[in-house]
Amino acid sequence: MTKDTTKTAETGKFAADRFQAAVGEANERTKVAVEKSTKLFEEATELTKGNVEALVASSKIAAKGVETLGQEAADYGRKSFEEASAALKSFAEVKSPTDFFKLQSDYVRSAFDNLVAESSKMSEAVIKLAGEVAEPITSRYTVAAERVKTLAL
């Protein structure tokens, strides 16, 4: 072989080696990128699954709480109706206007006090329920924020 042919062969081999190294490096980078993307996709899927589970848990708590509040409101309504009925019967048995106004005043005061107490009780129950409903979502938000922060690094 001549000197030029040898030099051309060496240059060709060098170029082929460089090309093969570049292709190998590109393949390695692609492999790493695919693995990272797959991991990110899996993490996103897990986050979404956890978020949906938190939403379902929150909805169940809300439904049960609304049911309980509705039952308590019905019980209060039934109790108020019974008290009003009893008061009306006692009004019918009154002998004087003075006794009538006293009974009426006592009933109105009692009904008002009961209404205030029930309103306070219901307000506290609604506030407590709101906290219970928000808890699964708040906890999930904290977990999701940490995972996203970890993935971003």
Image (cartoon, rainbow, N blue to C red):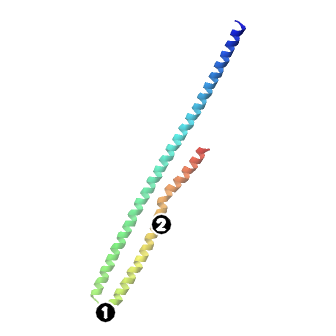
Q: Quadrant of residue 1?
A: top right
Q: Quadrant of residue 34?
A: top right
> Whole-Å distance between the Cαs marked 2 and 1?
44 Å
Q: Secondary structure at mark 1?
A: helix
Specify few, some or many for label 1: CA neighbours under 10 Å numbering under 14, 14-19, or 20 or more.
few
Residue sitting at 65 percent across and 19 percent down?
Answer: 15
Numbered circle sitting on residue 97: 1
Task: Name the residue nearer the viewer: 18 or 149.
Answer: 18
Identify the mark at residue 127; answer none if there is no mark: 2
Does residue 118 appear left or right of residue 85 in this picture?
right
SS class, disc 2: helix
**Of pointers 2 and 1, the one earlier in the residue sequence:** 1
- Rendering coords of residue 134 (x, y %): 49, 59
Q: Is residue 53 left or right of residue 88?
A: right
Number of marks drawn: 2
Horizontal and vertical percent position of residue 135: 50, 58
Front-most of 1 and 30? 1
Establish if 132 lies above or below 106. above
Against 145, is 7 above or below?
A: above
Query: Badge 2: few (under 14), some or many (20 or more) residues near its Cα, within 10 Å?
Result: few
Give the residue at x 34% y 75%: 79
Dots 2, 1 in contact, CB < 8 A: no
Name the amino acid type tagged 1: Pro
The answer to whether 63 appears left or right of 35 in the picture is left
Specify the quadrant that holds the C terminus. Answer: top right
Q: Residue at x 31, y 92 (%)?
A: 97
Residue 29 location (% of width, % of height): 60, 31
In the image, farthest residue toward the front? 4
